[in-house]
Image (cartoon, rainbow, N blue to C red):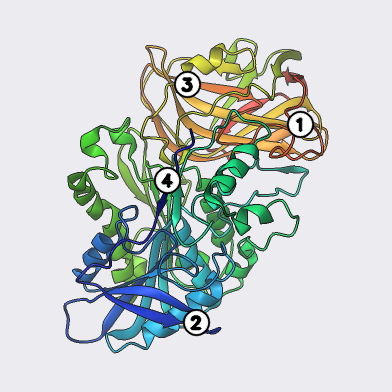
């Protein structure tokens, strides 16, 4: 039985003034205003989101009051087509122009002194980036968290490989972008083709998502502007917050790497790197006890707010007060360790580590001669993902030790650490592997505890557009303390489902096709091009 709940707009709080903000095409977008206490005009913080400005999920009334109590009039707006706002429900089509027009409205209000900053997570962090692309002069700074300018897209690396598609984009369209409200439901991921439970869902509610259907038409409008649009816009101070366990971190790092190389943006960029997942659960609390669940316990939510919002307020205060240079360029949390400040990421004094994949495991030296190991991947029985909800990876942080017992997973384990060892910087896995076009390669870097439990440190994945003999997987970045007695392990496989789509036959769409036949992949160890794992080396 498919359980479906539609969630509409919550009541506007008594302490919020709702207004309808006109866009250039006549559409009006609903916004709540939480006034700062000062009788004089002052700065404003703008948040634009598709999740209900008044609902419990993103607790915007609490956030609006928190900013207002610290001198910022908060404006929280439903984006076009969502909840109380007018217009068509279209993902990422209008956010640059609507951001510009909303900034124009906010800056012109009698309670605003003309200075506007923007803050937000995920999609409402993306709207801050989109508004920066508009170049509006009133926008003084942005603080996007767990997001990026290419949010939800499949990144193409330009070398015949691309990222593996996350299932979350289409699931998102069938949850948040059907109509003005939200639908709570869970697909049966065992169904094939993969699209089948979604079509059943649309039949049940009697309507479809134009955003979902456009994914299969070959001409979807529902994509963010290219990152080039951000690089070519007027630079503004930007504080990017990235979660070490965020399933959207790939898009955060995509932006940060581009901005840090740009002469205009680099000096404006600040980084905050935290041991959190997309839903802001923290590694130190994982797995999450009921008393620490800010999604269910109001007391836990109240405890969360200072650590959640104060970094942005400190940043905005520095920008508007002319003291941005006094803030460190990078503030980062070492998993199982402390917080540190720095001027670069990775830190200039970070130690690099290199391990070679050998028949015995991870080793400091490559094997003396070439050898091969193999795994057989069955697309109808892919390696399962690490937990129930990829957005809340730390909520029920999973022990992945059993995955190493599967025949379709190659696990390479290193020696036990004699003392605490800090792993910091980029993580790269190079594989000498024979794989056909359409093949998926997944790698997971694990922390193996002395008792045998294994927990995720980082992961990366590739889809091959053409047959290849080598592949380099980007596992992004880490700041992780491998404690004494613990071991590194690396899993290599061809599935991570249902977080990522399963392999499909060459040229087929994984959403509409049946699974392909099992296929054997061979990995070469040693020889002139040894397979290796590198951490922090440049």
Disc 3: which residue: 400
Disc 2: which residue: 23
Q: CA distance from mark 4 to mark 3?
A: 20 Å
**Callout 4: few (<14), some (14-19), or many (20+) C-alpha neighbours within 10 Å?**
many
Is disc 4 placed on a helix, strand or loop? loop
Is disc 1 placed on a helix, strand or loop? strand
Q: Which numbered mark, 4 or 1, is in the foreground of this view?
A: 4
**Callout 3: few (<14), some (14-19), or many (20+) C-alpha neighbours within 10 Å?**
many
Is disc 3 placed on a helix, strand or loop? loop
x and y percentages locating residue 139 in the rendered image:
43, 77
Q: CA distance from mark 4 to mark 1?
A: 32 Å
- In this view of the protein, which residue sits in the foreground, 219 or 309? 219
Disc 1: which residue: 470
- Which of disc 3 and disc 4 is earlier in sequence? 4
- Which of disc 2 and disc 4 is earlier in sequence? 2
Q: Are marks 2 and 1 in contact (CB under 8 Å)?
A: no
- Which of disc 1 and disc 2 is earlier in sequence? 2
x and y percentages locating residue 294 in the rendered image:
27, 44
């Amino acid at each position: 039985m498919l359980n479906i709940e539609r969630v509409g707009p919550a009541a506007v709080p008594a302490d919020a003034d709702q207004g309808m903000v006109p866009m250039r095409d006549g559409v009006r977008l609903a916004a709540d205003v939480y006034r700062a206490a000062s009788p004089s005009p002052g700065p404003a913080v703008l948040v634009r989101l598709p999740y209900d400005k008044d609902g419990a999920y993103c607790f915007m009334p609490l956030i609006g009051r928190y900013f207002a109590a610290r001198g910022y009039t908060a404006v929280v707006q439903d984006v076009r087509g969502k909840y109380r706002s007018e217009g068509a429900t279209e993902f990422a089509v209008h956010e640059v122009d609507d951001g510009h027009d909303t900034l124009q409205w906010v800056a012109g209000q009698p309670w605003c002194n003309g200075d506007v900053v923007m803050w937000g997570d995920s999609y409402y962090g993306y709207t801050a980036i989109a508004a920066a692309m508009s170049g509006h002069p009133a926008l003084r700074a942005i603080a996007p968290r767990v997001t990026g300018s290419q949010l939800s897209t499949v990144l193409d690396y330009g070398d015949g490989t691309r990222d593996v598609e996350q299932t979350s984009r289409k699931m998102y369209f069938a949850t948040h972008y059907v109509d003005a409200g939200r639908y709570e439901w869970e697909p049966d991921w065992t169904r094939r083709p993969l699209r089948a439970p979604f079509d059943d869902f649309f039949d049940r509610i009697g309507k479809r998502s134009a955003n979902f259907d456009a994914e299969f038409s070959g001409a979807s409008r529902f994509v963010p502007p290219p990152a080039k649009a951000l690089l070519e816009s007027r630079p503004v101070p930007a504080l990017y917050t990235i979660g070490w366990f965020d399933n959207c971190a790939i898009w955060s790092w995509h932006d940060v790497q581009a901005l840090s190389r740009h002469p205009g943006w680099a000096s404006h960029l600040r980084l905050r790197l935290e041991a959190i997942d997309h839903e802001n659960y923290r590694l130190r609390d994982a797995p999450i006890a009921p008393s620490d669940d800010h999604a269910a316990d109001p007391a836990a939510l109240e405890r969360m707010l200072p650590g959640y919002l104060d970094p942005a307020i400190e940043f905005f205060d520095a920008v508007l007060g002319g003291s941005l240079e006094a803030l460190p360029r990078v503030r980062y949390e070492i998993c199982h360790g402390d917080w540190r400040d720095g001027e670069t990421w990775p830190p200039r004094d970070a130690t690099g580590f290199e391990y070679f994949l050998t028949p015995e495991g991870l080793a400091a030296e490559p094997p003396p001669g070439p050898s091969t190991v193999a795994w057989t991947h069955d697309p109808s029985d892919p390696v399962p993902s690490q937990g129930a909800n990829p957005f809340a990876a730390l909520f029920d942080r999973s022990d992945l030790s059993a995955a190493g017992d599967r025949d379709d997973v190659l696990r390479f384990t290193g020696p036990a650490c004699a003392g605490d060892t800090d792993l910091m910087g980029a993580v790269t896995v190079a594989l000498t592997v024979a794989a056909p076009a359409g093949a998926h390669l997944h790698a997971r870097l694990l922390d193996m505890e002395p008792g045998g439990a294994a927990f995720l440190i980082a992961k990366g994945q590739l889809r091959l557009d053409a047959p290849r003999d080598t592949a380099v997987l980007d596992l992004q970045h880490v700041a992780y303390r491998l404690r004494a007695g613990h071991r590194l392990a690396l899993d290599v496989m061809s599935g991570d489902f249902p977080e990522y789509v399963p392999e499909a036959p060459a040229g087929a769409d994984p959403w509409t096709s049946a699974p392909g036949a099992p296929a054997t992949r061979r990995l070469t160890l040693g020889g002139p091009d040894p397979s290796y794992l590198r951490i922090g080396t440049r």
